[in-house]
Image (cartoon, grey):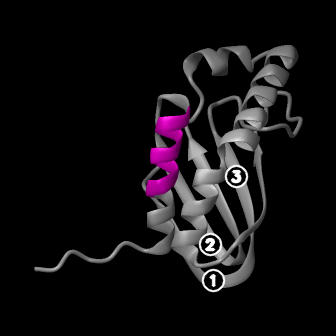
Amino acid sequence: MDKPQASMAQNIAQAVRAFEQERTGHAPKSVTVVLSDDALVITLHGALSEAEKALARTPNGAAKVQEFHSQLFATAADPLRQDIERITGAKVREAIAEIEPPQGTVMKAFAGGTIVQVYLLAAGVATDVYSNGRA
């Protein structure tokens, strides 16, 4: 029997998990991917280490975690962008990652370990959603 072909969203989720594992040394507990026209939203649940989550509980620590992930995303995200372009067939125009600490200020990721990445694509793609479940 033929194995069903993975959707674009599922392929992106697999690429993100591999990228995070290589980049940070641990994979997120789960990944959700939403493709809609020219937008791609990736949510990584449980992406921060226990030390990062503990550090992010204070405003100063949250700023350090934000800066670290901001720099990491800015300097190391090209291979992931290339994977996204290969999978979707559309260039990535812009990308950002956000983390939000417990105080509610929008920063670079969620203190509970969730990271949200948003990509704007240069062309529309078919709507697709994939989630391997929340941890």
Q: Residue at image x 58%, y 45%?
A: 44
Residue 24 on image: x %, y %: 55, 30
Residue 104 appears left or right of 19 = right
Between circles 1 and 2, the one closer to the viewer is: 1
**Which residue has dot 3 on it?**
117
Residue 31 on image: x %, y %: 51, 51
**SS label for mark 1:** strand
Q: Is residue 102 visible?
A: no
Q: Are marks 1 and 2 in contact (CB under 8 Å)?
A: yes
Depth check: give the residue in front, 134 or 91: 91
Q: Residue at image x 66%, y 47%?
A: 77
Q: Are marks 3 and 2 in contact (CB under 8 Å)?
A: no
Q: Is residue 97 visible?
A: yes
Examine the rendered structure and indicate whether residue 68 appears above or below residue 132. Answer: above
Q: Which residues are magenta?
A: 14-23
Q: The residue under label 1 is which amino acid type?
A: Val
**SS label for mark 3:** strand
Residue 35 numbered tag: 2
Q: Are marks 3 and 1 in contact (CB under 8 Å)?
A: no
Examine the rendered structure and indicate whether residue 19 appears above or below residue 41. Answer: above
